[in-house]
Image: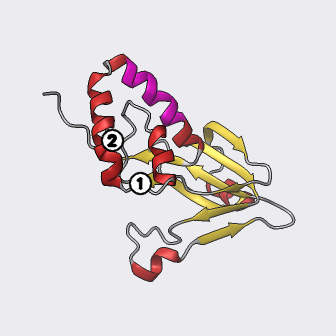
Amino acid sequence: MAQMRLLVKGAAQVVRVAAAGEKVKLKDAMSDLAIVNATQEEGVSIAVNRDGTIAAVGLDSEVAGMFPGASWAAVIDAHGRSVVPGLVDAHTHPVWAGDRVHEFAMKLAGASYMEVHAAGGGINFTVEHTRAASEQELLDLLLPRLRRMSSAGQFQRRSRVPPPS
């Protein structure tokens, strides 16, 4: 009996970035999505291997037929919902301290970045506040940001964190 990590079943549709397992999509191919839609009779399933790799996407009966007798660590009933890929942010800085909301009013009034900078704002404001914050303060600020990012569909981040000096 195959041990599988996850079965998502009953979805109205599943949006796939790659229809044929492409590892890389370039140029015009980047706008080609493969959408698997449910029928009147059944939904769409996604089977995920133990290693976290998507093993199959198809109608519920098709996927069930591919894994007869499989043991699933988790089963999610998508109940007519759409399932879409999570977003990847290739450049983000979620660790920071210092609120720059006060700069917004200046920008609305027409101030340039250099005018904001001359008034003590800009990136240097954030750098000063981040350096002054403790590790615990930065962690306390980071965790809710990561939760908000995930709830908005961003599931993978890449951020360069410099080594301690």
Which residue occupies the foreground of this view, 103 or 24?
103
Q: State the predominant SS element of the stretch in magenta.
A: helix
Residue 55, compared with residue 22, is above or below; it is: above
- Residue 120: x and y in percent read 31, 38
Residue appearing at x 53%, y 52% in the figure: 86
Q: Which residues are magenta?
A: 137-147
Q: How many marks?
A: 2
Residue 31, compared with residue 92, is above or below; it is: below
- Residue 18: x and y in percent read 50, 68
Residue that numbered label 2 is attached to: 119
> Which numbered marker is on residue 164?
none
163 sits to left or right of 106: left
96 sits to left or right of 16: left
Which residue occupies the foreground of this view, 154 or 120?
120
The tag earlier along the polypeptide, 2 or 1, is 1
- The quadrant of the image that shows the N terminus is top right
Q: Dividing the picture into quarters, in which one does residue 57 lie?
A: bottom right
Residue appearing at x 51%, y 53% in the figure: 108
Report the amino acid beneath label 1. Ala
Residue that numbered label 1 is attached to: 111
- Cα separation between marks 2 and 1: 10 Å
Callout 2 environment at 10 Å: few (<14), some (14 to 19), or many (20+)?
A: few
